Amino acid sequence: MMHVLIILALALILLALVWRGAIHVDASFPWLLAILVLGFLSTSEAFVAWVAARLGILYPPIAIVLLTIFVILALITALLIGYSQLRQRQLQIIRYLVAKDLAEQERRLRGVG
């Protein structure tokens, strides 16, 4: 029963962070889904044994650890892709603003001179 409470506590903490505005909903949904799915599936001995058998792992709990690491790396990669896209968009906006500012400065210099 304690494992279910831990899973629910982690999910509630994540939801509280979303509610307070510390993280955005679109970034938190994959994490919430991973917490719930991996959390509840890892409580099933049959599932843990099945994953270990499919991966050829002799000690079944390690299968869940490896599966969790894989999910975390996948989520980090997805967030990194989003960050990279935002950074690229930011650079485009900066270039646009600099070009606009330079054009305005040139226009003022030609008007004065």
Image: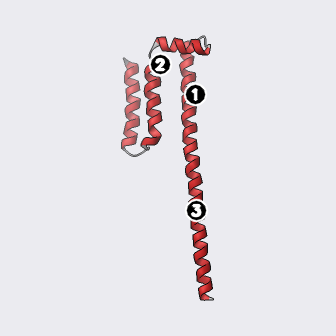
Which residue position holds label 3? Answer: 94
Along the viewing direction, whichever of 98 and 12 lies nearer the viewer: 98
Q: Earlier in the sequence, mark 1 or mark 3?
A: 1
Residue at 58% from the left image edge and 52% from the top image edge? 87
Q: Identify whether 70 is placed above or below 62.
A: below
Q: Is residue 38 above or below residue 108?
A: above
- Percent of width and height locating residue 71: 54, 29
**Is disc 3 surrounded by few (<14), some (14 to 19) or many (20+) residues within 10 Å?**
few
Pinpoint residue 5: horizontal percent, then vertical percent. Answer: 37, 23
Q: Answer with the quarter of the image where residue 89 lies.
A: bottom right
15 shown above or below 50: below
Q: CA distance from mark 1 to mark 3?
A: 36 Å
- The nearer-to-camera label among 2 and 3 is 3
Colour treatment of the image: secondary structure
Q: Looking at the picture, does residue 97 appear above or below residue 29?
A: below
Element under disc 1: helix
User: Which of the image's four quarters has the N terminus?
Assistant: top left
Dots 1, 2 in contact, CB < 8 A: no
Residue under circle 1? 70
Check if mark 1's residue and mark 3's residue have beta carbons within 8 Å: no
At a point 57% along the width and 27% down the height, the residue shown is 69
Label 2, on which residue? 42
Q: Report, in whole angstroms, how far the alpha carbon at label 2 lies from the one at label 3.
A: 47 Å
**3 or 58, which lies in front?**
58
Q: Amino acid at mark 1?
A: Phe
Residue type at numbered disc 2: Ser
**x and y, in percent, of residue 13 in the image:** 39, 34
Residue 106, quarter of the rendered image? bottom right
Alpha-carbon span between mark 1 and mark 2? 14 Å
Q: Residue at x 56, y 61 (%)?
A: 93
Mark 3: amino acid: Ile
In this view, the residue in front, 25 or 7, is 25
